[in-house]
Image (spheres, helix red, strand yellow):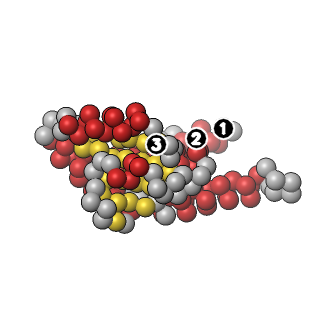
Amino acid sequence: MSPGTTTETAVRRYFDTLVELLHGTAVTIHDGTPLSLDQGIDWMRRAAVETHARGNKIMFVGNGGSAGISSHLAIDYSENGGCRIVTLSGFGADNALRRAGDIYFYAESSEYGFVEVAHLSLCHAVLDIEIGWHGGYQAAAGGEAELAKI
C-alpha cells in the first residue's frame, strides 16, 4: 500500500478498478463481430444450454496473454470433437486466442490477478443468471446472526 493511503481507500480503489475492467471487457464472436458484454454473456449462457441439451461439451480456454501452444492444440482438438469453445484472456489485445473458438472475452489489464478475477466473474455471471439470479444481494440464512457475533 502506498504511504498515506488508508486501507479503506485502497480497497475502494481496488474494487472500482475491477468493476471498470469488467464493464470494459471486449467481446467478439468467431467471425470478428463485436458484442456488448450483455450480449456476450447471453450468447455464452444460451450456448451452454444448447450444447448440454445435445450432449456435447463447452471448453473454456484462458491464458494470460501468452501464445501458448497448449491452448491452441486444446482448441483444435476440441473443435474437431464438436465442442463449443469460449476463450478468455487479458494483457495484449493482439492475443492469438482472439481468432480462436466461438466467442472471445478480453479483459484489458496487464495485472494477472485482475484478469483472472474478471474471467471468474464472467463465468460465474453466466451460471448465476442461468439458475435464476435476478439482481440484488441476499445474505445467506443466519448470516446476520453470525455477523453479530463478531
Q: Is residue 109 left or right of residue 2?
A: left
Is there a contact, CB below 8 Å, between mark 2 and mark 1? yes
Residue at left 48%, top 57%?
Answer: 93
Nearest to the observer: residue 95 or residue 14: 95
- Indicate which disc residue 149 carries: 1
Which is nearer the N-term, disc 3 or disc 2? 3
In which quadrant will I find the C terminus?
Answer: top right
Q: Which of 87 and 18 is in front in this view?
A: 87
Residue type beneath disc 1 = Lys
User: Residue 85 at what x, y percent from top left?
Assistant: 29, 44
Residue located at (66% from left, 37% from top): 149
Q: Position of residue 146 (x, y in %)?
A: 59, 38
Quick one: SS at disc 1? loop
Disc on the earlier residue, 3 or 1 = 3
Mark 2 sits on what residue? 145
Q: What residue type is labelled 3?
A: Ala
Kindly identify which residue carries mark 3.
67
Report the side of 90 relative to 61 (left or right): right
Q: In this view, does 88 lie above or below 43?
A: above
Determine whether the residue tagged by mark 2 lies in a helix, strand or loop: helix
Residue 55 horizontal side relative to residue 17, left or right: left
Query: What residue is drawn where x is 45% and y is 51%?
Result: 95
Distance, label 2 to label 1, CA atoms, is: 7 Å
Does residue 94 appear anywhere in the picture?
A: yes
Check the image and name the residue furthest to the right.
4
Q: Nearer the viewer, mark 3 or mark 1?
A: 3
The image shows residue 28, relative to residue 89, as above or below, that is below
Marks 3/2: CA distance? 49 Å
Q: Where is residue 53 in the image (x, y as percent from the top left)?
A: 15, 41
Residue at mark 3 to residue at mark 1: CA–CA distance: 50 Å
Q: Is mark 3 on a helix, strand or loop?
A: loop
The 10 Å Cα crowd at callout 1, few under 14, some 14 to 19, many 20 or more, is few
